[in-house]
Amino acid sequence: MKSKIYNVISICITLVFLGCSTSKSFESQIKVHRNQFKNSFLENPRSPLEENDLKYLSFFTPDKNWKKSATFTKEDNAVPFEMPTYSGITKPYIIFGYLDFDVDNKKIRLQVYQSAQKPPNPLYKNHLFLPFKDTTNGESTYGGGRYLDLKTDDIKNDKVVLDFNQCYNPWCAYSEGFNCPVPPSANHLNFEVNAGEKMYTGPVKKK
C-alpha cells in the first residue's frame, strides 16, 4: 500500500516538474524573441528607434494561452486589393487565406495577407502578414492595431501556430513618416488580446 502511495506521489512530482520546465522553456523562447526584436531596430538603417529609445518598449507577461493552433484555409480566388495605410497611401495585397481558432470557446476567423507588389520583393517571397485590432488598442496597446508575421513554410497540413506573444507595433507607433497598413475590418476583434507588445511610452518622433 505504501509503495503505491509513493508511486502516486512520485508521478505527481514528476508532472509538476515537467509543467514548470515547459513553462520556463516557453518564457525563455519569448525572452529570446524579444531580445532579437529589440536588436532588429539597431541593425536596420531605416529604424525609427535608437538604442536609447528601447527602454520605452514594453510587453505583456508571456502567456501560453495566447499561443493558438489555427486551421488554415487557402483563398483560391484571391484578387489584389489596395490596403490603406495610416499615411494615406495604399499598398497592394491579396487575401492569402483564413485562420480559424478558438478563444474562450468562441470561434475566431482572421484573414492573412500576402503582398501583391509587382515585381515581388524576393526578401518577402514567403512572407505572410496578419494585422489585427482588439479592444486593448488605445488603452494598453497602440491605437492603430498590431501585427503578426508568418511564413508560408509555417503552414503544415493546413495547420499553423499563431503566437500572439510575438505580435508587435507598426513603426507608426514610434515615429511619423512610415506607411503602416490599417488592419482591415475583417481582423477587428471584439475582445482583449493581452499578449505581445504594449503601448510605446516614449515620445513619437517627427519627420
Image: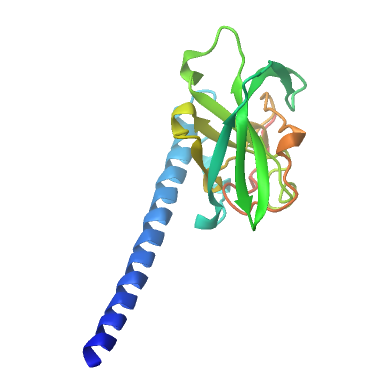
Position of 151 with respect to 145 (left or right) is left
Locate residue 172, reporting x and y percent: 67, 32
Q: Is residue 62 visible?
A: no
Instruction: Return the residue nearer the eye: 207 or 13.
Output: 13
Q: Is residue 99 above or below residue 60?
A: above
Residue placed furthest toward the top: 119
Res 8 quadrant in image: bottom left
Task: Looking at this view, name the residue that lies furthest to the left.
Answer: 3
x 38%, y 66%: residue: 19
The quadrant the C terminus occupies is: top right
Is 96 drawn above or below residue 14 in the view shown?
Answer: above
Counting from the top left corner in percent of width and height, residue 14 is at 30, 72
**Residue 203 rendering spot, x and y as whole percentages:** 67, 41
The answer to whether one can see residue 116 in this image is yes
Q: Is 54 positioned to the left or the right of 22 in the image?
A: right
Residue positioned 25% across, 92% down in the render = 1
Report whether 30 appears left or right of 92: left
Image point (71%, 33%), residue name: 183
Q: Nearer the viewer, residue 51 or 13?
A: 13
Give the quarter of the image for residue 22. Answer: bottom left
